[in-house]
Amino acid sequence: MRNLFVSLAILFSVTLWAENKSAESQKVVLQAKDISGDDNYLYAKGHIVLKYSKTLFLADTARYDKKRKILVVSGNVRIKNPDGSSVTTQKVILETKKNRVLFEKFFYKNKDDIWLSSKIAEKAEECYSLKDALFSSCMVDNPDWHMEFSEAKYNTKTKYIKLKDIKFYVGDTPIFYFPYLAFSTSRERSSGLLMPKLGYNSKDGFLYEQPIFLALSPSADLEFNPQVRTNRSLGLYSTLRFADSANSSGYLRVGYFEDKDDYTQENNLKNAEHYGVEASYESSDVLGSSKPDGYSDGLYANLVLFNDIDYLNLQNNSLYHLSDSHLKESKINYMLFDDKNYFGLNARYFLDANKDSNQDTLQELPSMRWHKFTDDIGIENLTYSMDIGVYNYIRNRGSESKQLELSIPIKYNTSFLDDYLKLELSEEVYLYSGYFDINDIVDDDYSTVSATHKIKLYSDTLKPYESGIHTLQWALEYAKQDHKGKGVEEYEALDNQLRKDFLTRKPFDDKITLSLSQFWHGNTLDLGALQRVSQTYYPDRDEHWGDLRHELEFSYDKWKVINSFEYSFEYQGLSEISNKIRYGDDKLYLNMEHFWRKDLADDNILSNEVAFDTKYKYNKDIKLFGSMTYDLDEKYSKKWKTGLLYNRGCWSVELSYAHDTSPVLEKDGGGSIDSDTFLVKLNLIPFGGTEIK
């Protein structure tokens, strides 16, 4: 069987038995160019492909000792494991009776590009043992960082490695020495210490936070975040994360921090203790099989309660649902729906971080809504829908309200001139009843029934050209309201704050609205344009013309320019202007915005600021970024940030410098702290990240 042609493949199998192993798991299947044997040995050489216990061996030569049950594979050996990892070695000695493997010139690499190498290695069951070895996740040739150690044990099942006498190198320079180190190379969660966070600022002093992570189960974990601020004191935050079913998950966080007396007095803080609780829960199948046939349901809840805003400021990793606004919202939303009906139960609770007390903050506890989706009445082109809402607005001090709203719109649609012209006739019955508990206001209720009549002519046309497609949409609508009960005059007589707090719909005089939208789509997708404009006309008002709204957008290649404005004919001036310019390609992203808004009635500018955001990819490793928001009237930067990200794949570092304003609760009410922050964020694969702020 010697000297066969290269194209000849000889396939045979030898069944081996080992202690506590099934015959199938120990089967060896060998394919080679040249195979021979005698009573004691089997030999193979040339393009060897060997399968053993779900592991694939590629090598130059192989020898099998039939009596001792030892297989020796040598010459450019490559091993492919079922978990996606691989081994390259010069020689492998496989003792099947002991289920042990010995390697010479061993190199192991898993699917995440983490590698181990040593001159001699041993694998017994699921564990590798190495002597005088190297470890890294960087390129094998001239790694940016690597670790040398005298002994290592790596469990391929648990993905856990234990090292002794470790030297950590950056390039060829030794940086740290550790007598012992153990960690997981898996991307799956496991208990242990996370990378610490370090920081310093002139008020709080040095910061050290050491996260402690506990993997309670495959569907739950617990993280403790004790922290020390040398000028302030100690604190602890704890976060429980869980997935209680395939359709639901949530988290719960509690925290407490107590300032030193001298820090509280020096910074004029309202409270020395800062504590709170946060929770979130989502489910896409709450009632399960208890739901009515054909219905789906869902629940979203988030909760944030605290005694002052520093409970949030002291967190190094804020939870995702919190915004930058000083008004923090807790809410519960439950919905039950099918393709015809929607039922909703909602509650919202607000905490104003600028206030010492939230006794006068308006809360919505609860509200209920039923929506009947658009459906046919039984006559062709005639449809209806329905909305019913019940709302309860409460607070301990100030006005409160209980409200009922009912809306039933009925619509008839038809078309003329081969669908070029369309007609919509609609009637909407709207009922509102509200009771207000307000001191010093004569009217403690407002109830009305209105019928809104609308006639709308509209068209939606499309015309192709050689260079692109033009779409034109226009609509002309006449709307009139009739009232039973209190109408426009009674509405205008109500207290302005009452209307702002509680009334979502404003009665209107007869009006005619013209709207126009047009789009241009270039065939090459390099050129596009969009325009939207709307104008309202009131026949019975002294000032006939309502606000003009206009939006214009151009896109060419990688550029996009957007302008929008509102113009008031009553005050003969612009009330709002927004301009944006954006550019983006593989290397550069640039976005600049300007927003201006004015209360024309009070002649007061509400907002006048510019925002800038950019990212630049200098090369495959380095990215630069920056952002800024600047108030043009107050002439100060509300916030800005600039920095760079250097990513080498096996490690990355982010350097940034930022300015921000954070709210705090002082003795006399809301206040703020301006802070300038320098951040160094280091991520070392597979150890994770740490930051110094």
Image (spheres, helix red, strand yellow):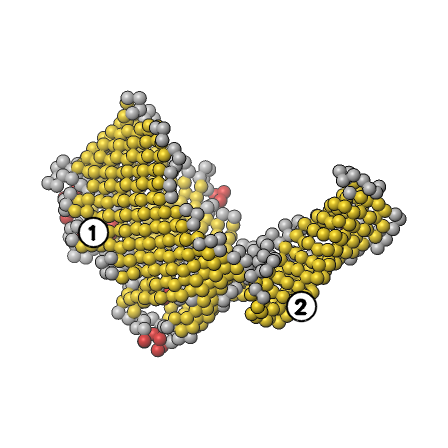
The residue labelled by disc 1 is 598
Query: Disc 2 on helix, strand or loop?
Result: strand
Q: Is residue 471 above or below residue 323?
A: above
The residue labelled by disc 2 is 150
> Which residue is most to the top?
417
**Residue appearing at x 35%, y 78% in the figure:** 262
**Residue appearing at x 46%, y 46% in the figure:** 284
The quadrant in which the C terminus is found is bottom left
Q: Is residue 134 above or below residue 534?
A: below
> Which residue is most to the right?
39
**Residue appearing at x 38%, y 76% in the figure:** 260
Q: Is residue 17 above or below residue 655?
A: above
Q: Which numbered disc, 2 or 1, marks the residue closer to the eye?
A: 2
Query: What percent of the width, then of the height, locates residue 457?
Result: 25, 29
Query: What percent of the width, then of the height, locates residue 223?
Result: 50, 63
**Residue appearing at x 14%, y 39% in the figure:** 544
> Which residue is most to the bottom?
262
